Image: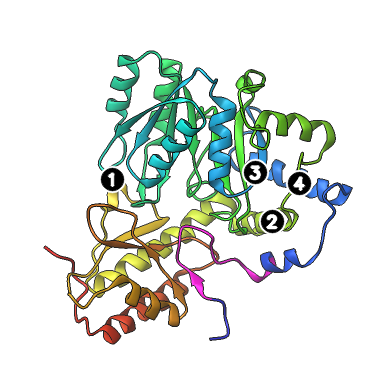
Amino acid sequence: MDRDKILLTPGPLTTTLRTKLAMLKDWGSWDADFNAVTASVRKSLLAIVHGADSHVVVPLQGSGTFSVEAAVATVVPRDGHVLVLDNGAYCKRAARLTSLMGRRCTLLPFDEAQPVSVAATEAALRADPSITHVVLIHCETGAGVLNPLQPIADLCERLGRGLIVDAMSSFAALEIDARKTRFDALVAASGKCLEGVPGMGFVFIRRAILDGCAGNSQSLAMDLHDQYVYMEKTTQWRFTPPTHVVVALHEAIAQFEAEGGQPARLARYQRNYETLVRGMAALGFQPFLDPAVQAPIIVTFHAPADPKYDFKTFYAAARARGFILYPGKLTTVETFRVGCIGAIGPDEIEQAVHAVALTLQDMGITSAAPAA
């Protein structure tokens, strides 16, 4: 096979040749040309959420989790109290990093097959006035659940609590409009639905709270307020930036805009999702989630009940045919996950389903139906 393997994962994702080629040049981190690229990326990111008037955007080196940790440490005062709405693995990670940042943290648990409940969140906030901030994972890719961003944002605004949104897997695909959705911080990354390469995150911070964030962070590298102030003053990053990642993102954003922006990207991912679910159903596979709560980002499938099924063998055989699948993230039932995002369309999804069909033949599995 002469092409790269297709990554059907929640990120890193398959990228275009144009995005890869953007990384073939070296850039000086203090050079005016590179600083102009950084400024252009920041302006474009704000435009995607219609946030130029209400928010600033602060890029940060590292994976998306670095930026989630930085957002909590920067936005939440050291005596703050964070309520994490928990319906999956990434929610639990947010709670863990909040505690490690020394902030008081309460987990509000929900079923991992269901969105978080607005009513239960309201009850928790009214019962404990010490809670200052809520953390919401917009699309919990542990199972693929879409959580109710707008109702939670409205609730936090009504009750005067801060909202930190992990939009890692939703930003640039699902609609997020800062003009109607109030959030103190929203976190995303380069290697997800913008279809750049991994290596940097970025955090949108509401201008109204920005000055109050000074001195909150106990970390030098992760202090987003300090990063913002320095960037505004000098146009430069405080510490060595991931130059190749930034220019790849710049190129990926140009392609995102040419495609038609967020609505067009969502439409393509929706087609990918529908093609995937239809094709896998024909083989007997059953999605874990009800379609009503499923985001068209990544789909969790029940493992086949056939005793001949083994994920490692299944993964290796699909990989040999050019497709990288993803293990399940659930604790209760055996599953695996297939992503719908990246620089791919329905043709690649159909090819992936065909590869899965051949893999089942290799393994002697006649039906992929799950256990009753």
Q: Which residue is mark 2?
A: 245
| Nearest the eye: 301 or 277 | 301
- Residue 44 point in image, percent of width and height: 68, 45
Tell me the distance, in whole angstroms, between the alpha carbons under discs 2 and 3: 15 Å
Q: Residue at x 48, y 25 (%)?
A: 103
Q: Which residue is mark 4?
A: 38
- Which disc number belongs to residue 45? 3
- Residue 109 point in image, percent of width and height: 29, 35
- CB contact under 8 Å: marks 4 and 1: no
Q: Nearer the viewer, mark 4 or mark 2?
A: 2
Instruction: Answer left or right for 111 relative to 272.
Output: left
Please, what is the three-letter code of the amino acid marked with disc 3? Leu
- Residue 305 point in image, percent of width and height: 17, 70
Q: Secondary structure at mark 4?
A: helix
Q: Secondary structure at mark 1?
A: loop
Magenta highlight range: 5-18
Tell me the distance, in whole angstroms, between the alpha carbons under discs 4 and 2: 11 Å
Tell me the distance, in whole angstroms, between the alpha carbons under discs 4 and 1: 38 Å
| Nearest the eye: 343 or 335 | 335
Q: Nearer the viewer, mark 3 or mark 1?
A: 1
Q: Secondary structure at mark 2?
A: helix
